[in-house]
Amino acid sequence: MNGDRVEARERRDVDVITDDGVVLSVRDTGRPDAEHTVVFLHGLCLSRMCWARQDDNLAKDYGPAVRTISYDHRGHGRSGHAPMSTYRIERLAEDLAQVLEAMRVGGSVTLVGHSMGGMAALGYLGRDVGRRPIDPAGLVLVATAAGKLRHRGLGRLLGTPATGALFGMVDHTPEQMVRAILGPLCSTLRRWHHGASAATLATVAADALAAASVATAVGFLPALRDYDQYDMLATIRARTVVLSGGVDPLTPAVHGRDLVAGIPGAELVHLPTAGHMLPQESPHVVYEAIRRAIGIDSRGDLEAGARPAGLGARPAVAGVAS
């Protein structure tokens, strides 16, 4: 809320080496003893930079009271590549656990995940308690799903033989040829990025897609096809806000409704005219969802363990213009 708060936040770039030797590029902003830590998890073929707006807003509004951690998943951004056999949601959940341990994250924590990042968060929460370094107090799930991806929207393509064929050809086909095959699909996906300015999406999404290796883009497809965390939703105790877009072809709004129906006390924020890239299309709405999941009182300060208004026993559905 003032310049002093921004200046008080230190920013560090750290490499975390996982137990299978993959180097994860982590950005740690704020003090380790902050009252609350927000951990950002990005989507497939994106990078931690997709959370820049929300990270900056937390710095401006809460300064040293909130620490933020964002990192590039294996095979993404500045993190190291790994064998395609490790490109699984369960492995991303293990990576998250190891990042939390390596960064010595404690206290009150909120996980914020977009698309595949939200699936990684759910995968983490589905692990046995003894395999979770922390249990988050807050959870924000943005344009994501608990499963059934191959039954809805463009995800139906995951259920076709093409998914297995692409996975099998990557190791034996020149990358330029595979990129030529995937090019029309990427172009189609970009046309569904409603709401955000072309410049914003070109910077965050298109560049990240162009930089991602074919092994990364294709390697996670079987994992997304087989992913299912429906059975564990009822065990989630975090303050949860779910965001969905009405014209999202990748994770249609029905996925958000399923999440809210399954997670006790979860709140749904539905944006009727928004697509899949909500952190860029509606950054202010995503930021407000983070504030609610953290727990913000009427003065804009952190509440100690309080449930934010609107997160009652029954889900509240809000239609928000993007």
Image (cartoon, helix red, strand yellow):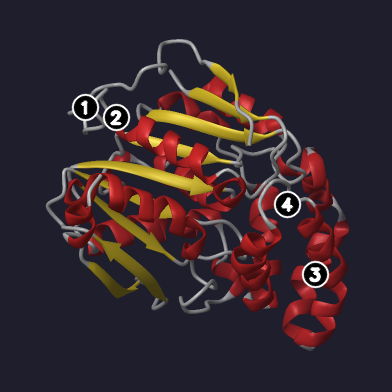
* Circle 2 residue: 295
| Residue depth check, mark 1 versus mark 3: number of the one nearer the observer | 1
Asked whether the beta carbons under mark 1 and mark 3 sit within 8 Å of each other, the answer is: no
Asked whether the beta carbons under mark 1 and mark 2 sit within 8 Å of each other, the answer is: yes
Residue 305 marker: 1
Residue 187: percent from the left, percent from the top?
Answer: 82, 64
* Circle 4 residue: 193
Q: Is residue 313 left or right of residue 247?
A: left
What's the residue at 76%, 38% (across, down)? 247
Residue 166 marker: 3
Element assignment for label 2 = loop
For badge 4, the amino acid type reads His
What's the residue at 71%, 50% (across, down)? 225
Residue 89: percent from the left, percent from the top?
Answer: 54, 54
Give residue 205's quadrant in the image.
bottom right
For badge 3, the amino acid type reads Leu
Give residue 290's quadrant in the image.
top left
Neighbours of disc 4 within 10 Å: few (<14), some (14-19), many (20+): many
Residues under labels 4 and 2: Cα distance? Answer: 30 Å
What's the residue at 38%, 54% (across, down)? 55
Tell which circle, 4 or 1, labels the residue nearer the N-terminal end.
Answer: 4
Q: Is residue 192 left or right of residue 146?
A: right
Point out the image quarter for the N terminus.
top left
